[in-house]
Image (spheres, helix red, strand yellow):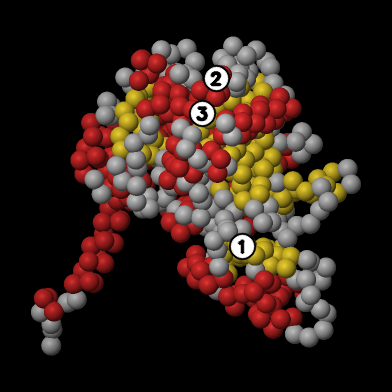
Amino acid sequence: MLKDSHNFPTNGLNVLSDSLRDITIEQKFATIQKRMAPMFETVFPDPLAPRTVIVIPSLTMDAEELNKISGIYHYEERMLCLLMLLQLPRTNLIFVTSQPVHEAIIDYYLHLLPGIPGYHARRRLTLLSCHDGSSISLTEKILQRPRLLDRIRAAIPNPEVAHITCFNTTPLERRLAVELNAPLYACDPALTHWGSKSNGRKVFQAAGVPLPMGFEDLRDEQDIINALTQLKEAQPSLRKAVVKLNDGFSGEGNAVFSYEGCGVNGNLRSWIATELPKRLRFEAATETWASFSQKFRQMQGIVESWIDGEDKRSPSVQCRINPLGQTEIVSTHDQVLGGPSGQIFLGCTFPADAEYRLEIQEAGRRIGEVLQQQGVIGRFAVDFISVREGDSWQHYAIEINLRKGGTTHPFLMLQFLTNGIYDVGEGQYFTPMAQPRYYYASDNVHSNAYLGLTPDDLVDLAVLNGLHFSGATQQGVVFHLMGALSEFGKFGTVCIGDSPERAKKLYKKTINTLEQAANL
């Protein structure tokens, strides 16, 4: 007997409805994205062309992983560097945040603009906020507010020359693009899986780029145990291995397992199974085996060999696949890492060491070609572990960041402030006067002594101590994450100089200045 339709389970209908809605969103998104390539050809090269850039600095990532980072909700401020786009005199900028950004911080960036009066830039800037400090992502907050969506739409003079730029992309950003009728200049959310730790290893292999011995697509504790066992059996001298969550952020999803004391006799796998919960050492200070193993089952991950070396570095290459499908080298950096075993990103120096920066550029280009073949566009970065072997360096690719990252905003600030060029052939940045520029940047200038200092205090100290960036010399210090200073004792800085030594000297002077002020 046929059942009446009212007897069908409603949850099944809801699932079907959600599925159909997702298909519709994907179809609409694909149509909207077709505007990106023509815009890139005609609008992007013309500094006088009208355009609207919608900045959505949402870190749409796992909330538990993000909460491991102090002051994480202020990290939306890192993309305030894009206010420098207002130096293009017919560019409108819409910047949306979870919480309002202090007016002193906005004023600080507008006064850095070269060649544009602040009032002219300010009238082309629309600042909007969700007034919501909860832990859900900014993009989700925006989608929950129809009136805010209306205000964003109303601030777009011409949707045909508007696009969205964001920190990373998920189906939420795809839905937002459809709601705003504006394409994303970023990776299609359907392709972001190529940035996971597991798929990153597959991309490296396809590109012919060396990587540590290891195993990907691991699902649970038993897979971790098997991988650790096989690594040690294949490399008897191996001292340590790294366990990584597929979508860990800034090194906080990593843990290190030591083989010390495993012995040569007995059952290796049994020993690892017993020791794993006790001796796995986590980069995140608050992490435990119980929460990490649960997160691993949800997110899955990899295990790979720890790379040893007396002279060991961690460079990265930043690339962009433009809407025409061309891979471009953007920059190189040497990362400054910290944490229990040196895997947490603290900052970077630009450019990477001249001994190997062209080598990692070439590796980045090959990786970009593989990603481009999958349809990826937008910025990405590749991190390496590099060790000196005699007179040369051996580079092991360890991670793809298929999004903006900690090395994105420092380089953008250098570009915006100096209007120079990055010479790919030399791996060096030059001002319009053909002078080289270097920087030392950090997202983690932190001290409890800074608690209570305000953004105004920080700017005052910079000006009074000769640290503020000078347009005349094209050297000096630029701050970010200023909103995190008073509550978390934390801020970020980009120290630009005409030599690596000058950049590092500016950084040290900044620290000394803050320490002296905090101890008054």
Q: Which residue is more in the foreground, 202 or 224?
A: 224
Task: Identify the residue at horizontal 69%, vertical 40% (top origin).
Answer: 334
Cα distance in 3D space between marks 1 and 2: 40 Å
User: Can residue 175 be seen at all in this image of the molecule?
Assistant: no
**Residue 92 left/right relative to 294:** left
* Residue that lies at the very extreme toward the front in this rendered image: 520
- Residue on which disc 1 sits: 282
Q: Earlier in the sequence, mark 2 or mark 3?
A: 3
- Residue on which disc 3 sits: 458
Task: Identify the residue at horizontal 67%, vertical 15% (top origin).
Answer: 434
The amino acid type found where label 1 is placed reads Phe
Q: Earlier in the sequence, mark 1 or mark 2?
A: 1
**175 versus 435 height, above or below:** below
**20 versus 500 height, above or below:** below
Circles 1, 2 touching at the beta carbon (< 8 Å): no
* Residue that lies at the very extreme toward the bottom in this rendered image: 1
Number of numbered discs visible in the structure rendering: 3
Assess disc 1: are there few (<14), some (14-19) or many (≥20) residues with their C-alpha within 10 Å of its C-alpha.
many
The amino acid type found where label 3 is placed reads Leu
Circles 1, 3 touching at the beta carbon (< 8 Å): no
**472 versus 405 height, above or below:** above
Cα distance in 3D space between marks 2 and 3: 9 Å
Q: Quadrant of the N terminus?
A: bottom left
- Residue on which disc 2 sits: 463
State which mark lies toward you, 1 or 2: 2
Q: Position of residue 470 (x, y in %)?
A: 58, 16
**448 versus 108 height, above or below:** below
Assess disc 3: are there few (<14), some (14-19) or many (≥20) residues with their C-alpha within 10 Å of its C-alpha.
some
